[in-house]
């Protein structure tokens, strides 16, 4: 009994002492030892203005309206135009205010009218549902997902006028599109069902029941790394559908009609297009190349059927002369124009070769007007782009195009030389 009493006494004295050693008391921290409080998250201002336009949004940024726009004031001059086929002119090529934004976390919109040339049209009017970067759903009027240079934003163009493949693919169309990016942007896709615009044209109101299926797949295998090939991309795109109606009229670099369908020839059946593409930008250098082919079943004036085929290609190279970075989205000058600081913006040298050809079978079948249409075009161009700021750009291009056929006497049409100038304001 004495042993038990002695053990209990020792437990009462020792256990609290052991507990105190196992869990020592922590002295109060001094002010210098207190963990630093996390800085408050920086919130976007409800109203802002900058190079990307003017915006108004709520505290979370889920509801936002952004006002942007751009204007292209162009000049076209045709030295050596002895035949008087073209007119030297100044023109407002594009005047496009843009209203875009979001209506909650999962919804975006864009409305872009155009008043260029004194004609009011709706270029874009679409609504996006975006549950994930991997899947977005777009409805409305938008660029058909086919041409590489066609999908490039107009303010980012390397030349005043796009190359010939853009004449072979559709412009804007009305319909529904699924699009998104997979594997962190390594794969980008677009798939759409649209009314079906003719080559180089847009659709606002459909005039037949036929619809086009359009798609595009771009692979950028090095996009997730830090390799110099990070901005290397390969793509393939195309359309297919049943269409009826007028055939396209292709134009020269100076926007003069050079290929016109023969009287009574109209689309009547399957139309398909395909276009392999490549783009690469690294440091001051850039390369953009694409090929496009368009084939349409047509009906002639005598009721017989044939196939109209045309193909086009281009390769464009750019180099930023002032150490700036070339990009598909356009050069953003590191040093904005400020003569007082010895800063002059960014200079970009650009060069391009391109061509367009109507297939010999289409010519022999009498599908084009031989007295008004060329069979082949080969062109080259060079220019200098001066980005004073992200919002002001001055462009000077020269382009030479030679033609096979197209003269009323059956000979080759006179070559075309064009000097383009452009003053661009964007915000």
Image: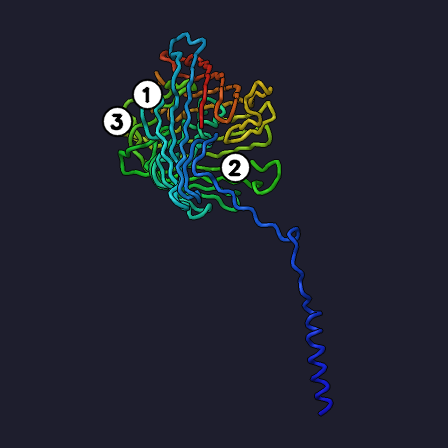
Q: CA distance from mark 2 to mark 1?
A: 38 Å
Q: Tell me, yes or no, whether the two marked residues, 3 and 2, touch with CB atoms within 8 Å.
A: no
Residue 206 image point, x, y percent: 28, 34
Q: Earlier in the sequence, mark 3 or mark 1?
A: 1
- Position of residue 91 relative to residue 314, above or below, is above
Where's the N terminus, which quadrant?
Answer: bottom right
- At numbered mark 1, what does the secondary structure look like: helix, strand or loop? helix
Q: Earlier in the sequence, mark 3 or mark 2?
A: 2
| Residue highlighted by disc 2 | 234
- Closer to us: 212 or 262: 212
Compared across the picture, whether 222 is left or right of 168 comes to: right
Residue 350 seen in render: yes
Disc number placed over residue 302 in the picture, else none: 3
- At numbered mark 3, what does the secondary structure look like: helix, strand or loop? loop
Q: Earlier in the sequence, mark 2 or mark 1?
A: 1
Residue 216 image point, x, y percent: 44, 39
Where's the C terminus, which quadrant?
Answer: top left
How packed mark 2 is, by other alpha carbons closer than 10 Å (few <14, some 14-19, many 20 or more), is some
Q: Tell me, yes or no, whether the two marked residues, 2 and 1, touch with CB atoms within 8 Å.
A: no
Disc number placed over residue 118 in the picture, else none: 1
- Choose mark 3 or mark 2, whichever is in front: 2
Which residue is pictured at 30% across the width and 26% down the height? 265
- Choose mark 3 or mark 1, whichever is in front: 1
Q: Tell me, yes or no, whether the two marked residues, 3 and 1, touch with CB atoms within 8 Å.
A: no
């Amino acid at each position: 009994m004495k042993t038990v009493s002695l053990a209990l006494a020792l437990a009462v004295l020792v256990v609290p002492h052991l507990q105190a050693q196992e869990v020592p008391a922590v002295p109060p921290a001094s002010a210098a030892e207190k963990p630093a409080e996390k800085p408050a998250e920086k919130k976007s201002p409800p109203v802002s203005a900058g190079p990307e336009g003017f915006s108004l949004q709520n505290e979370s940024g889920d509801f936002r309206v952004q006002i942007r726009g751009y204007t292209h004031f162009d000049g076209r001059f045709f030295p050596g135009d002895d035949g008087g086929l073209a007119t030297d002119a100044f023109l407002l090529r594009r005047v496009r205010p843009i209203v875009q934004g979001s209506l909650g976390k999962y919804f975006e919109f864009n409305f872009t009218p155009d008043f260029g040339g004194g004609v009011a049209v709706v270029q874009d009017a679409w609504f996006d549902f975006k549950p994930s970067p991997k899947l977005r759903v777009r409805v409305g009027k938008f660029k058909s997902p086919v041409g590489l240079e066609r999908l490039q934003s107009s303010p980012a163009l390397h030349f005043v006028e796009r190359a010939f493949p853009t004449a072979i693919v559709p412009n804007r169309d009305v319909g529904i599109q699924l699009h998104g990016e997979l594997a962190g942007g390594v794969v980008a896709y677009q798939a759409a069902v649209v009314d079906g615009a003719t080559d180089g044209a847009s659709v606002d109101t459909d005039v037949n029941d036929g619809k086009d299926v359009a798609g595009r797949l771009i692979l950028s295998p090095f996009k997730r790394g830090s390799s110099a090939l990070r901005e290397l991309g390969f793509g393939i795109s195309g359309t297919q559908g049943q269409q009826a109606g007028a055939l396209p009229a292709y134009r020269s670099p100076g926007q003069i009609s050079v290929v016109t369908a023969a009287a009574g020839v109209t689309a009547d059946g399957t139309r398909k297009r395909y276009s392999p593409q490549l783009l690469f930008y690294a440091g001051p250098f850039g390369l953009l190349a694409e090929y496009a082919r368009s084939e349409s079943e047509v009906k002639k004036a005598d009721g017989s059927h044939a196939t109209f085929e045309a193909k086009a290609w281009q390769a464009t190279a750019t180099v930023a002369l002032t150490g700036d970075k070339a990009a598909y989205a356009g050069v953003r000058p590191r040093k904005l124009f400020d003569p007082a600081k010895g800063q002059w913006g960014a200079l970009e040298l650009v060069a391009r070769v391109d061509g367009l050809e109507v297939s010999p079978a289409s010519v022999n079948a009498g599908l084009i007007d031989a007295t008004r249409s060329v069979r082949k075009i080969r062109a080259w161009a060079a220019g200098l782009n001066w980005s004073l700021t992200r919002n002001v750009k001055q462009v000077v291009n020269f382009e030479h195009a030679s033609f096979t056929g197209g003269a009323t006497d059956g000979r080759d049409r006179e070559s075309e030389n064009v000097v383009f100038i452009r003053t661009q304001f964007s915000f």
